[in-house]
Amino acid sequence: MTPAIRFALIGNPNCGKTSLFNRLTGARAKVANYPGVTVERRSGRVTGLDHPAELLDLPGTYSLFVTSPDEQVARDVILGQLEGERRPDLLVAVVDACNLRLGLRLVMELRSLNRPLLLALNQMDEAKRRGISIDVTGLSSAIGIPIVETVAVNAQGVQPLRQALESYTRAPGEDDDTQVLSLSDRQESIEALYSEIESLMRQYVIQPAEAPQWQDRLDALVMHPVLGVLFLFSILLVIFQAVFAWASPLVDVIDGAFSSLGEWVAGTLPEGILQDFIANGLIAGVGGVLVFLPQILILFFFILLLEDSGYLTRAAFLLDRIMRGLGLSGRSFIPLLSSFACAVPGIMATRTISDPRERFVTIMVAPLMTCSARLPVYALIIAAFIPQQTVWGIFNLQGLTLFFLYLAGIVSAALVAWIMRRQQAREEFPLLLELPSYRWPMAYHLLMGLRERAWIFIRRVGTIILSLSIILWFLASFPGAPEDATLPAIDYSFAGQLGHFMQPLFAPLGFNWQMCIALIPAMGAREVAVSALATVYAVGEDSIETALGATLAASWSLPVAFAYLAWFVYAPQCISTIAVVKRETNSLKSTIIFTVYLFALAYFAGWATFQVASAILN
């Protein structure tokens, strides 16, 4: 059987490779208006072709002379140096038409490999809007490479590339000589390379004399060392205010729906184990977490807006000076920002960091960024203990509390990074990032991103969280209480016994045995702590969020609630995160250090919070 033809998308970071990949394969890989989003090679089947074809989306790189692990992945795939994987049959060099000079350097290096090569000139619509005129026919003839014009954000805009891939008839497996410039050749060729690029730009490209002035004026504000930081913090405050203020109506609808479902189950099924399983196991477990979906989507709506607008790379430059004082740099900003969604892709994004020491420190502190899985726990406890009131005339007190929880993680990450970098030899690597153009966020990207996040969350609810909730219900229900029982039935269950066993360890933090139980399944998914608390407190038939919040407010003191929040700020309660740290560092020792230091930090933070809050409030 003839293997499928392999095409590979290769180009500078943020040139539109992943958008083209999504359009050609029907995939939903993450796209954003900043470099470093793709750090692994992706693979998909090209749709709409008469022959089977595989398309690879490679990490962005500016040159074949690589400086970071993600660029090494791209180079190895191109040269066929990955074990067990044949090299691509056709290289598709994707170049941003608005930044053709930068993209042509990589194109020229790829041309020197003597491999089949096609140039996809992307974002042609934006180039024309800016008054950039490119003689595509002349440029193609001059460099000896076929060129197609594409607009990745438009379904019709990828048809020229699809047709070019359809017409490609080279037999898979046919070998070509591959030439790779050695490092000794680099200095001799670099001057000639740039000379050729400048000659091509003069002959075939007409550009406006000046860049749009409004972009320069906006940059002067958002990248100002003082005003820019104030602007960034203002944006964050607005986001956290919206998470509570905008989500309330939708949360009430979902909460009411699960409440009605619980009441229907209670009225339809006879009392017994089946009713208890459905009401307290399934409905309380799934509904208790799914009710926080609106807040998570609102948070990601704002993040996607900032990504697509081109602001985030500027924030990296803005924070570079501050982060260098901590021993990091602006390169760490994107991985740390990604960790607000989930620490797993955030840690993987550290592959874009050239300095191995900085990469290690960034991996160690990435989980201190508050991931979306913590949000249901935060929202539940904040709603139960913090009143819904306005302070200082404009701020919602619950939103401010959430903001300070996020800020606590950020400040702690900064402190840990500073301590770790003081123990290492310092080596300065200047920050070099391409500033993307500002653009209006695209509805397509927003909707696709929100749908993807909603699906990820719902899939977790329907798989991991549902499974853990069922297991927890079983542990909380069996064995039953003896006939002469004097305590609630759950005290005699497996869960109760385990909780009572753990409670002395967490007594200095003020945790009761029910709180201890919730910490165990949360290792699989932090959100399960909510459904675990709903199960052990037997909240199932009433309005889940409201009833559980009222139960916690009656059972916990305010210092205990604050201590529980402090624990979740720091604890590495995610097996997936621990596993990806092991994979990215390839070190069992580093993984153990990572796990131990975060649990120790969580325990100390919980204890200190409980003691200080108790002293103040008592």
Image (tube, rainbow, N blue to C red):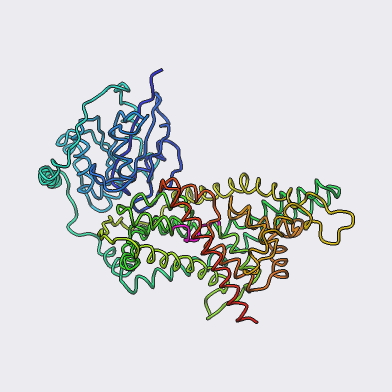
Quarter in which the C terminus is drawn = bottom right
Residues 204 and 453: in front is 453
Residue 439 % position (x, y): 35, 56
Compared across the picture, whether 152 is left or right of 145 comes to right
User: In the picture shown, does residue 578 fall above or below 510?
Assistant: above
User: In the picture shown, does residue 23 fall above or below 547?
Assistant: above
Q: How many marks?
A: 0
Q: Residue at x 68, y 49 (%)?
A: 469
Compared across the picture, whether 1 is left or right of 60 comes to right
Residues 378 and 483: in front is 483
Q: Is residue 371 magenta?
A: yes
Name of the residue lying farthest toward the right:
483
Compared across the picture, whether 361 is left or right of 596 comes to left
Q: Residue at x 42, y 70 (%)?
A: 233
- The image quadrant that residue 307 belongs to is bottom left
Residue 298 % position (x, y): 53, 59
Residue 256 % position (x, y): 70, 58
Residue 314 % position (x, y): 33, 62
Q: What's the magenta bit mostly, secondary-structure-wise? A: helix
User: In the picture shown, does residue 236 fall above or below 463?
Assistant: below
Compared across the picture, whether 16 is left or right of 515 comes to left
Residues 140 and 9: in front is 9
Q: Residue at x 30, y 71 (%)?
A: 224
Q: Which residues are magenta?
A: 366-373
- The image quadrant that residue 71 belongs to is top left
Quarter in which the N terminus is drawn = top left
Q: Is residue 192 magenta?
A: no
